[in-house]
Amino acid sequence: MWVFFDLNGTLVDPSVLLEPAEIPIAALDEANVMAMITTIAGRETAFKPLLDAALRRGLVRAGRPSNEAAGALEKLPDMPAYPDVAGALSVLRDGGFQLAVLTQSSLEAAEEVTRNAGLRDAFELVLSAPALGAFKPDDLAYKAAMEPHLKAYHFHYGMNTSSWR
């Protein structure tokens, strides 16, 4: 069975992008909402500009210069894996699961982040939802990700790895 993971904020920690951590975490959530709205509106864009805009708005709300967003975006490739991720992925792989990443990010960015976080080898597939035709949670993103690789599939959203010990 396949298990698909989101990347940013699920496997890797966006809190390292800016201080305080609440700004990049909220910006990631806001950018995901904007990605959904973009899909609903039938438009296309890359995820990074959505995140940039959300970071800038968050910085302004915090009374800080919006140009600090550029420095945060430069740190995206270096987001570290959350502490329990590597072990949890190992348990899943050892249990016979096939692992994949399906992210809002570009394929190039996702490959770089998973490599830099030391996670790339845990995944058989790293996929970009926009490159597949739509941002998540549009069904098209999931169907396009799965159809070439699966005959039957199951999903679990929001895995909580803390109970796997």
Image (cartoon, rainbow, N blue to C red):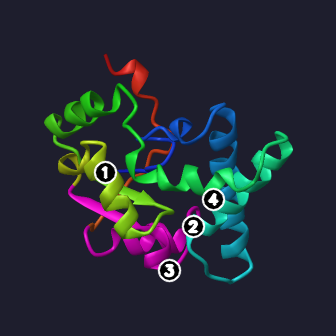
Please name the residue that numbered disc 3 is placed on: 133
- Between the C-alphas of marks 3 and 4, the distance is 19 Å
| Placement of the C terminus among the 4 image quadrants | top left
- Between the C-alphas of marks 2 and 4, the distance is 6 Å
Q: How many marks?
A: 4
Q: Residue at x 35, y 68 (%)?
A: 108
**Nearer the observer, disc 1 or disc 3?**
1
Badge 2 local density, few (<14 within 10 Å), some, or many (20+)? Answer: many
Between discs 1 and 4, the one toward the N terminus: 4
Between discs 2 and 3, the one toward the N terminus: 2
Please name the residue that numbered disc 4 is placed on: 51
The amino acid pointed to by label 2 is: Phe
Badge 1 local density, few (<14 within 10 Å), some, or many (20+)? Answer: many
Q: What stretch of residues is rendered in magenta?
A: 124-149
Residue 102 drawn at (x, y percent): 41, 59
Q: Residue at x 63, y 33 (%)?
A: 19
Q: Is disc 2 in contact with disc 4, using a CB cutoff of under 8 Å? A: yes
Badge 4 local density, few (<14 within 10 Å), some, or many (20+)? Answer: many
Q: Secondary structure at mark 2?
A: helix
The answer to whether one can see residue 53 in this image is yes
Q: Residue at x 29, y 30 (%)?
A: 88
